[in-house]
């Protein structure tokens, strides 16, 4: 019998921590997108290479108040990966990396499934093997082992039949309520359209409850007179905080002008093709700190920062991939450049706002914006710094406003005396009369 060391302190995690606590940190829509990320990683394993087309690959998502399912033909989960890595809580050191992965923390799929319900199944078919896994969460919580048992293991299938299917058929009360709500569907559809647009552009088809999600690529205005700024840099030999990973991180940043839209204005942060932040106007992207606080004067501002690495753990995103790790060294250094590139655009938009005092014919900056065309982000349409026409000088007015309030009855009486129709005109007439009395008579 092994003698217990009285000086030891038990620090083992509980299953309840993962099932009930960690699931609180993620929204339903983010959990759905986490599962899509896993499908995309399968597509990347199936068709490696940054420029590889995903044409012919599909993800089909269905949900209602009774169940949630996601099915793809993106190559499936190899049996060895399933047995050793895919269902572990956290990413193992020796797990074979998926180059350019978008699902790297080892918590996304499990957290999503636990959030959705109490019973789920995972079926996978690859060219070499297949398996089915069924988990009853309540029963699993009552057992000591942290393992799941595969229900079946089989042979591989032909290339055209490979893929993964996940079904949650006993939803949690929160998931049941969310998935029966039309606003949840709209939010998920919109989030997928924004966050997965670059993979959709590569040919990946995503359907949600039978409706295909169409691509909506980022654009920026460009012309001979108005050019967005563009900067690229490779941070060599970046080290993960834990020191487990190292390698280069490639960064591209664009700043410029888009269509006037308070909803779409701000910074967009993209990691390995996955949009992490969209239209951000917070201190995370320097608004309200180095940059001014956002207001609708800047509704045409657009900034895009792309972070790419073969080792996804080096990228500046949190485990939910819905926010940025502001302490990430690559992000901190890039943020300085983002601020530097944003300043000329902000000054330009301030000048555009000042043009409102000029006749329309003299509003050179507004005219340049209206003549520029929206283009997909590309080095060829951009310059090293934001380029724009010089604004028309605005002469300062010698006039000064005077504002005061008086009783409506008395103002109405003076309107009759002066023969004017507006209260402001009463004030002007009264001022002219007083000035004439004291200085011109």
Image (cartoon, rainbow, N blue to C red):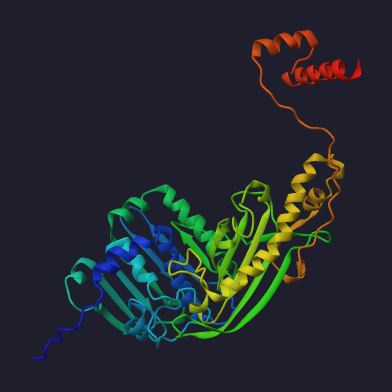
Q: Is residue 433 above or below residue 128?
A: above
Residue 163 appears in view:
yes
The residue under the point 37% across, 83% down is: 92
Q: Residue furthest front?
A: 438
- Pinpoint residue 189: horizontal percent, then vertical percent: 49, 56
When asked about the image quadrant of residue 433, the answer is top right
Q: Residue furthest left?
A: 1
The residue under the point 39% across, 76% down is: 106
- Pinpoint residue 218: horizontal percent, then vertical percent: 64, 61
User: In this rendering, would 144 be left or right of 191?
Assistant: left
- Pinpoint residue 298: horizontal percent, then vertical percent: 67, 51
Residue 72 or residue 349, whichever sits in front: 349
- Pinpoint residue 392: horizontal percent, then vertical percent: 86, 49
Residue 327 or residue 27, whichever sits in front: 327
Q: Is residue 308 above or below residue 338?
A: below
Q: Residue furthest bottom?
A: 1
Q: Is residue 220 above or below residue 2?
A: above
Residue 333 or residue 359, whichever sits in front: 333
Residue 136 appears in view:
no
The residue under the point 32% across, 79% down is: 131
How many numbered dots are placed on residues in this image? 0
**Quarter of the image containing the N terminus?**
bottom left
**Quarter of the image containing the C terminus?**
top right
User: In this rendering, would 226 be left or right of 409?
Assistant: right
The residue under the point 73% across, 52% down is: 349
């Amino acid at each position: 019998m092994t003698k217990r060391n009285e000086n030891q302190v038990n620090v083992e995690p509980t299953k309840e921590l993962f099932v009930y606590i960690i699931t609180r940190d993620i929204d339903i829509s983010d959990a759905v997108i986490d599962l899509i990320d896993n499908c995309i990683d399968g597509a990347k394993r199936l068709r490696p290479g940054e420029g590889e087309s995903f044409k012919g690959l599909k993800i089909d998502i269905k949900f209602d108040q009774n169940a949630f399912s996601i099915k793809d033909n993106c190559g499936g989960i190899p049996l060895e990966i399933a047995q050793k890595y895919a269902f572990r809580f956290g990413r193992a050191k020796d797990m074979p990396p998926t180059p350019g992965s978008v699902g790297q923390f080892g918590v996304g799929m499990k957290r999503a499934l636990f959030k959705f319900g109490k019973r789920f199944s995972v079926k996978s078919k690859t060219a070499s093997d297949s398996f089915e896994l069924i988990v009853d969460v309540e029963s699993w919580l009552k057992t000591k082992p942290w393992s799941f048992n595969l229900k079946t293991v089989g042979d591989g299938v032909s290339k055209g039949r490979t893929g993964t299917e996940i079904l949650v058929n006993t939803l949690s009360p929160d998931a049941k309520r969310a998935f029966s709500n039309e606003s949840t569907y709209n939010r998920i559809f919109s989030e997928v359209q924004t966050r997965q647009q670059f993979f959709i552009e590569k040919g990946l088809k995503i359907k949600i409850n039978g409706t295909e999600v169409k691509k909506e690529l980022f654009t920026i205005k460009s012309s001979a007179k108005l050019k967005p700024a563009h900067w690229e840099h490779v941070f060599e030999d970046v080290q993960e905080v834990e020191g487990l990973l190292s390698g280069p991180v490639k960064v591209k940043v664009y700043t410029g002008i888009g269509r006037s839209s308070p909803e779409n204005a701000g910074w967009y942060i993209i990691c390995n093709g996955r949009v992490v932040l969209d239209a951000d106007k917070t201190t995370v992207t320097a608004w309200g700190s180095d940059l001014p606080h956002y207001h609708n004067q800047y509704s045409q501002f657009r900034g895009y920062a792309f972070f790419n690495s073969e080792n996804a753990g080096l990228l500046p995103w949190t485990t939910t991939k819905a926010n940025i790790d502001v302490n990430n060294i690559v992000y901190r250094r890039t943020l300085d450049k983002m601020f530097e590139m944003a300043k000329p655009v902000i000054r330009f938009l301030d000048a555009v706002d000042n043009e409102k005092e000029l006749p329309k014919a003299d509003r050179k900056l507004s005219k340049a914006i209206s003549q520029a065309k929206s283009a997909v982000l590309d080095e060829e349409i951009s310059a090293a710094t934001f380029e724009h026409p010089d604004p028309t000088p605005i002469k300062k007015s010698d006039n000064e406003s005077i504002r005061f309030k008086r009783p409506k009855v008395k103002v109405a009486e003076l309107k009759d005396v002066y023969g004017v129709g507006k209260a402001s005109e009463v004030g002007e007439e009264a001022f002219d009369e007083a000035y004439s009395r004291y200085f011109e008579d």
